[in-house]
């Protein structure tokens, strides 16, 4: 009899979570439901904390080793240029695709919501979205503080400088590289232990939200959710098709290989939870360690394809709901603003909502419209997180092929 793998257990856990959540929703008193949801969510929180515990040392160790193995600044610049070009292209594709879909479907126009009073608030913070603050955010005041708060972009910035300096000192730096390489392998071993807890986390995440919301969350906003999920699947198709121009049929094979990581990101609504496993899968797929170690951490700050699609979806949905007409020029202006302000905030809770809140105010669209989507944000975030994993997997494989080829 074939042994059930991690994917199988996660799927079983998700199904069990759906059943458990619905049974409790329909049969338990409200006080019990609240206590159950709060209590069982602790299991998901523990898992995500264990993953976040691993992220900072893993990103630092792998990125420094990857840069040092490249050998010189020219190689780092060359690979970085190719990587950022791919990231920007795919982000633009995701944003434009969301814009086209929302202009065709007009999902929000039938709501006819009255404009809210100017004093109304959303309770969603929108500070630190200016270009100046974004640039300041890239460079850490303290690497210890950056690691403590899992600021991936700041860790990446420090790691790039550290890796280049380590390679520059020659023979003396090899001791550090060897040590950090060992650290990366130890952390990956830890990841194997943590991943055994993944099905429990998936069960608790699904059960908690369905116990409170019930099936209503699935059909109240059914049209929006279904449209978004179909758009996400179409985006996957575009990403795979474009990647196949570089790596051929192996693009589909790669998506099949990272299915565990994708399912984990989907069930926990966190692409961070899949990072350690994704790192290992890409190396086993044949991507060189030095490329994976460099591209993947960058991708978690700059290549959020699922989040990009959602931002245009949500922004235009809210504008349509309030009957605010936006010209094509205004929509493309919004697209460019979203492109800029979305970079480097992967570690911010509800990052997409934060970016959207800041962008809406720039175009005179009521931020209160975000309250329309808060109830289903968890379901939407599941698809966003899974797509971010797929996009970063394909990006790493493509850059590997362009730079050194793959085994």
Image: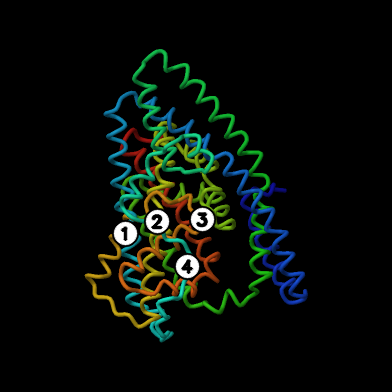
Q: Which residue is mark 1?
A: 93
Provide residue 105's location: percent of width, then percent of height. Answer: 37, 78
For discs 3 and 4, the disc positioned in front in the rendered view: 3
Residue 11: mark = none
Q: Residue at x 64, y 58 (%)?
A: 11
Q: Position of residue 232 (x, y in %)?
A: 43, 64
Q: Badge 4, how many Cα within 10 Å: few under 14, some, many 20+?
A: some
Whole-number angstrom distance, CA of label 2 to CA of label 1? 8 Å
- Residue projecting furthest to the left: 329
Residue at image mark 4: 229
Among numbered discs 4 and 1, the one appearing first in the sequence: 1
At numbered mark 2, what does the secondary structure look like: helix, strand or loop? Answer: helix
What is the secondary structure assignment of the residue under circle 3? loop
Looking at the image, which residue is at 66% across and 49% down? 46
Which residue is found at the position 40% from the left and 49% from the top?
A: 344
On the image, the x and y values in percent for residue 188 come to: 57, 35
Q: Earlier in the sequence, mark 2 or mark 4?
A: 4
The reply to whether discs 2 and 1 touch (Cβ–Cβ < 8 Å) is yes
Q: Is residue 294 left or right of residue 51?
A: left
- Figure check: 381 above or below 303: below
Marks 4 and 1 close (CB-CB < 8 Å): no
Tell me the distance, in whole angstroms, between the alpha carbons under discs 3 and 2: 17 Å
Judging by the rendered image, the residue that carries numbered circle 3 is 349
Residue identified by numbered label 2:
305
Q: CA distance from mark 3 to mark 4?
A: 22 Å
Mark 2 vs mark 4, CA separation in Å: 13 Å
């Amino acid at each position: 009899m074939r042994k059930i793998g991690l994917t199988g257990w996660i799927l079983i856990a998700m199904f069990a979570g759906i059943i458990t959540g619905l049974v409790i929703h329909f049969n338990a008193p409200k006080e019990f439901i609240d206590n159950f949801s709060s209590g069982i969510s602790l299991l998901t929180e523990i898992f995500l904390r264990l993953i976040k515990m691993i992220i900072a040392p893993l990103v630092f160790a792998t990125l420094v080793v990857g840069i040092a193995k490249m050998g010189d600044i020219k190689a780092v610049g060359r690979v970085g240029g190719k990587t950022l070009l791919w990231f920007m292209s795919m982000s633009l594709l995701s944003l434009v695709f969301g814009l086209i879909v929302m202009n065709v479907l007009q999902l929000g126009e039938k709501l006819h919501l009255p404009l809210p009073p100017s004093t109304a608030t959303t309770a969603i913070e929108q500070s630190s979205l200016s270009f100046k603050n974004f640039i300041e955010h890239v460079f850490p005041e303290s690497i210890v503080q950056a690691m403590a708060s899992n600021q991936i972009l700041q860790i990446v910035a420090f790691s790039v400088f550290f890796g280049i300096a380590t390679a520059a000192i020659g023979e003396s730096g090899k001791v550090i590289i060897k040590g950090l390489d060992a650290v990366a392998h130890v952390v990956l071993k830890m990841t194997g232990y943590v991943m055994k807890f993944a099905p429990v986390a998936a069960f608790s995440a699904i059960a908690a939200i369905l116990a409170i919301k019930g099936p209503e969350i699935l059909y109240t906003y059914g049209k929006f959710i279904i449209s978004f999920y179909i758009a996400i699947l179409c985006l996957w198709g575009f990403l795979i098709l474009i990647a196949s121009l570089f790596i051929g049929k192996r693009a589909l094979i790669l998506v099949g290989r990272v299915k565990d990581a994708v399912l984990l990101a989907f069930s926990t609504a966190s692409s961070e939870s899949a990072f350690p496993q994704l790192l290992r899968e890409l190396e086993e797929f044949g991507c060189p360690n030095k490329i994976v170690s460099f591209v993947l951490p960058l991708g978690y700050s700059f290549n959020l394809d699922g989040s990009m699609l959602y931002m245009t979806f949500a922004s235009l949905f809210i504008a349509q709901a309030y009957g605010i007409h936006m010209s094509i020029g205004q929509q493309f202006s919004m697209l460019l603003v979203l492109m800029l302000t979305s970079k480097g905030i992967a570690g911010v809770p509800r990052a997409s909502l934060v970016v959207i809140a800041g962008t809406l105010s720039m175009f005179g669209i009521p931020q209160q419209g975000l309250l329309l989507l808060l109830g289903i944000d968890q379901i939407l975030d599941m698809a966003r997180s899974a797509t971010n994993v797929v996009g970063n997997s394909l990006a790493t494989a493509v850059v590997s092929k362009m730079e050194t080829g793959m085994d």
